[in-house]
Image: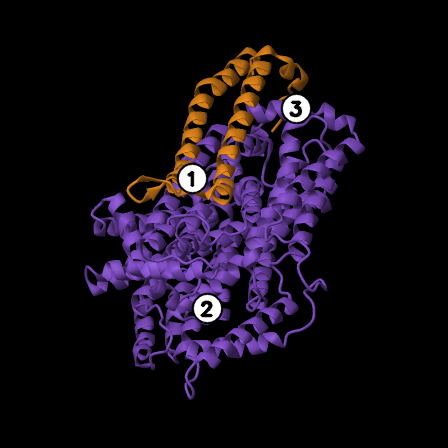
């Protein structure tokens, strides 16, 4: 199969691509750092502030348990939010870019 | 084609015969073996191969109850039902292999299922690839014995997928083809980079595979009483059969089937636990706190740290951190290895090459996250449920590590409805554990084989000049050799302590693979020197730190512990009224301590005590890996690599030029 040749440098300078690149970088690394900070609060908090983890919230269920459980929902939330933004914005920008280049 | 059919038939026969032979070792039911291998050898699919199984098993099962009851409590499986279920799994997966083998014609088919797996299918396969028997049985066991800490431990395994989703999945789908080497060699000197990437892939896969194989052998011995060596050979033959004949298509479907079985089992069991709790989660937790057995268990646990707790306070302590995970730095170190290592695991990266587009890769990670996360949330119910209904004392009497908690719970929950349902449910979960092992080891063998056959043989030795036929043959032959090596390592490592190897695999992936993958994808100045120095330093640092860590056995430290036990026992003996001797348990501990106290010498690398106090090296080795990769690239700048960054970056973001990767 003969491979299509692209002018990669030109595409990289295309304003649509630059916009896509900036949006994606900010979104991906921003949320990645948020999820890491949120996750590491769990082992760090359990080790250094056990008092907070022992506070009972509902019946015998304490803050520590709810915080650990919230990790699952936060991770799922980030995943769904990313999926929403990527399907709506990133994929649209990519499609527009490809259309513009007549590829 | 006929030769291929003979191969398939032979592998079917081998695997069934291996299972049958393992049974013979238990009881001389020799007649079973030929009867079972005969229909299989004719290449008969599912039903016929499975049919003779219950009969063969029945003849074995009869002598079992007659055996004198051992002093130690055991998990009693109904052998007829259990082996029947194992046979169904073997038959179904072998059917999948026969079907997959027909579709596997090119290298793309073998390594990446021709890019024809859908996002949803791949999501289930990722979950099946990732959740090992250790997470299935081990984490619920930890929760049943140590409460909160077991749950906290499980969180990192899901959060790890945020890194996979946001950083590596889509770019890798767009920039890669079959292996880690493909991604890394794009704008670097292909030969050295591929060689090092392959070495690192093989190292990670071998560590992980060894841990899985040894775990498989021990688990099968516990579950259905098959001797260790037979279990390893049986699992190994099946694993080789799946990969050699079915390649990625068969491996994917084995993983999907396993994930489906695992989730059904976990759902059903959690449902039964919740029925008992009247669907009242708050009441469920109150039962834990007020259980006298759990209170007693926790009092004993905290007494070791010199804390006195009793009654409801002890019960409440079960829901608080610190009963099991006592070194926070080690936890953070493990967390780092998980969060960064999962995204650097070659067998997980490889899964993204099986889907056609970046969108499908994205969808597959999100589906996998819901399956994996859902499973760990259910695991909490299983672990706490086991603590309530079986009591920690009951669980440790069967297995001190708590690994049997889920299975015992299944038997009891089922038996509360009717005894036969207990046996059926237990057999079903044993079969799930078996399928779990098969799915994980197959993925690992495939990843290691792809690195050797595709990176080293085709691209380094043959300069990429190999036709499809030769590539597929190389892939099959390599898988066979890798699988055979896996079996031999499993046999040799029976008496070794392999628990740290999973953590080591994640540490190497996080310190060696991930930094170079991320820098290759996102840093313009990254180049060959950076890849090689990053891979080398990250890998060597992780392995080196584990070699001098508390994971190794230090005879002098063991001897000291032994002396302490002897002193304590002597004190206990002195306190006893004259003429009375120590209890059986204490006497055993004393005998073991006396042996331990005699130990002298040094650890594997000649140390008397650990140099590095953490069990998980990630905290040090991950920054080292990143630094080495960055410094290496800066020290030897390369213009071509910098110029090609635009191409890599546009490709990974847009998927342009990707047809090459799929259609080849």
Q: Colour of chain A?
A: orange
**Residues under labels 1 and 2: Cα distance?**
55 Å
* Secondary structure category for the residue under label 2: helix
The local crowd at label 1, few if under 14, some if 14 to 19, many if 20 or more residues have their Cα within 10 Å, is: few
The residue carrying mark 3 is: B647
Q: CA distance from mark 3 to mark 2?
A: 51 Å
Using the rendered image of the protein, determine whether residue B584 is visible from the camera's viewpoint: yes
Single out the mark in the foreground, 1 or 2. Answer: 1
Measuring 25% from the left and 62% from the top, which residue is drawn there?
B422
Where's residue B650, x and y in %?
61, 22
Name above or below for residue B186 compared with residue B600: above
Relative to the observer, which residue lies in front, B256 or B511? Answer: B511
Residue found farthest to the right: B636
Disc 2 sits on a residue from what chain?
A: B
Say yes or no: labels 3 and 2 on the same chain: yes
Q: Is residue A69 above or below residue B204?
A: above
Residue designated by label 1: A52
Front-lying residue, B171 or B140: B140
Q: Which residue is mark 2?
A: B18
Image location (x, y in percent) of residue B45: 37, 57
Q: Which chain is purple?
A: B
Q: Which of the 4 image quadrants contains residue B643? A: top right
Position of residue B217 in the picture relative to residue B397 (left or right): right
């Amino acid at each position: 199969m003969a491979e299509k040749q692209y002018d990669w440098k030109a595409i990289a300078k295309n304003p649509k691509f630059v916009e896509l690149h900036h949006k994606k970088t900010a979104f991906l690394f921003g949320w990645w750092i948020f999820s890491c900070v949120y996750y590491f609060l769990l082992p760090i908090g359990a080790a250094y502030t056990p008092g907070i983890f022992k506070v009972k919230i509902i019946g015998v269920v304490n803050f520590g348990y709810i915080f650990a459980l919230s990790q699952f929902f936060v991770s799922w939330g980030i995943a769904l939010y990313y999926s929403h933004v990527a399907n709506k914005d990133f994929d649209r920008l990519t499609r527009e870019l490809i259309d513009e280049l007549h590829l | 084609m006929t030769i291929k059919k003979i191969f398939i038939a032979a592998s079917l026969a081998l695997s069934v015969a291996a299972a049958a032979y393992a049974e013979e070792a238990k009881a001389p039911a020799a007649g079973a073996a030929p009867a079972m291998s005969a229909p299989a050898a004719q290449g008969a699919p599912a039903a016929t191969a499975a049919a003779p199984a219950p009969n063969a098993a029945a003849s074995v099962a009869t002598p079992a109850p007659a055996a004198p009851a051992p002093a130690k409590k055991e998990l009693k499986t109904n052998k007829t039902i259990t082996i029947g279920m194992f046979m169904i799994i073997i038959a179904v997966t072998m059917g999948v292999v026969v079907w997959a083998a027909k579709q596997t014609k090119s290298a793309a088919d073998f390594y990446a299922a021709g890019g024809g797996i859908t996002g949803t299918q791949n999501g289930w396969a990722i979950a099946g690839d990732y959740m090992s028997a250790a997470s299935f049985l081990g984490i619920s066991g930890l929760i049943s014995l140590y409460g909160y800490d077991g749950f906290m431990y499980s969180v990192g395994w899901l959060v790890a997928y945020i890194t996979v989703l946001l950083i590596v999945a889509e770019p890798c789908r767009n920039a890669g083809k079959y292996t880690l080497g493909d991604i890394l060699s794009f704008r670097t000197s292909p030969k050295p980079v591929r060689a090092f990437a392959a070495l690192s892939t093989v190292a990670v896969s071998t560590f992980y595979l060894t841990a899985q194989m040894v775990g498989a052998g021990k688990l099968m011995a516990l579950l259905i009483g098959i001797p260790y060596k037979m279990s390893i050979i049986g699992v190994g033959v099946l694993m080789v059969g799946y990969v050699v004949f079915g390649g990625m298509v068969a491996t994917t479907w084995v993983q999907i089937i396993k994930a489906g079985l695992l989730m059904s089992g976990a759902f059903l069991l959690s449902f039964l636990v919740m029925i008992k709790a009247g669907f009242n989660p708050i009441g469920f937790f109150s039962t834990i706190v007020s259980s006298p057995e759990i209170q007693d268990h926790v009092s004993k646990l905290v007494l070791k740290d010199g804390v006195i707790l009793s009654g409801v306070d002890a019960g409440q302590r079960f829901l608080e951190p610190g009963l099991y995970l006592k070194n926070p730095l080690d936890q953070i170190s493990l967390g780092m290895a998980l969060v960064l290592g999962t995204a650097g695991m070659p067998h997980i990266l490889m899964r993204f090459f099986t889907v056609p587009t970046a969108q499908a890769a994205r969808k597959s990670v999100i589906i996998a996250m819901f399956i994996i996360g859902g499973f760990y949330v259910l695991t909490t119910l299983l672990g706490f449920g086991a603590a309530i209904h079986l009591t920690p004392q009951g669980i440790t009497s069967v297995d001190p590590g708590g690994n049997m908690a889920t299975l015992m719970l299944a038997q009891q929950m089922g038996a509360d409805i009717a005894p036969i349902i207990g046996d059926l449910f237990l057999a079903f979960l044993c079969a799930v554990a078996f399928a779990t092992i098969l799915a994980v080891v197959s993925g690992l063998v495939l990843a290691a084989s792809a690195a050797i056959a595709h990176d080293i043989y085709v691209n380094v030795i043959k300069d990429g000049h190999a036709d499809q036929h030769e590539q597929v043959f190389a892939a099959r032959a390599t898988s066979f050799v890798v699988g055979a090596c896996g079996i031999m390592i499993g046999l040799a490592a029976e008496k070794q302590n392999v628990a740290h190897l999973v953590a080591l695999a994640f540490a190497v992936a996080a310190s060696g693979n991930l930094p170079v993958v991320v820098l290759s994808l996102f840093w313009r100045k990254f180049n060959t020197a950076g890849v090689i120095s990053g891979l080398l330093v990250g890998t060597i640092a992780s392995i080196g730190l584990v070699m001098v860590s508390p994971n190794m056995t230090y005879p002098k430290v063991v001897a000291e512990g032994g002396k302490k036990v002897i002193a304590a026992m002597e004190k206990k003996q002195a306190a006893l009224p004259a003429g009375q001797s120590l209890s059986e348990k204490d006497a055993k501990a004393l005998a073991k301590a006396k042996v331990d106290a005699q130990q002298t010498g040094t650890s594997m690398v000649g140390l008397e005590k650990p140099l590095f106090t953490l069990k998980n090296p990630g905290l040090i080795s991950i920054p080292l890996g990143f630094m080495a990769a960055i410094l290496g690239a800066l020290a030897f700048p390369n213009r071509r690599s910098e110029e090609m960054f635009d191409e890599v970056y546009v490709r990974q973001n847009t998927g342009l030029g990707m047809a090459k990767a799929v259609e080849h």
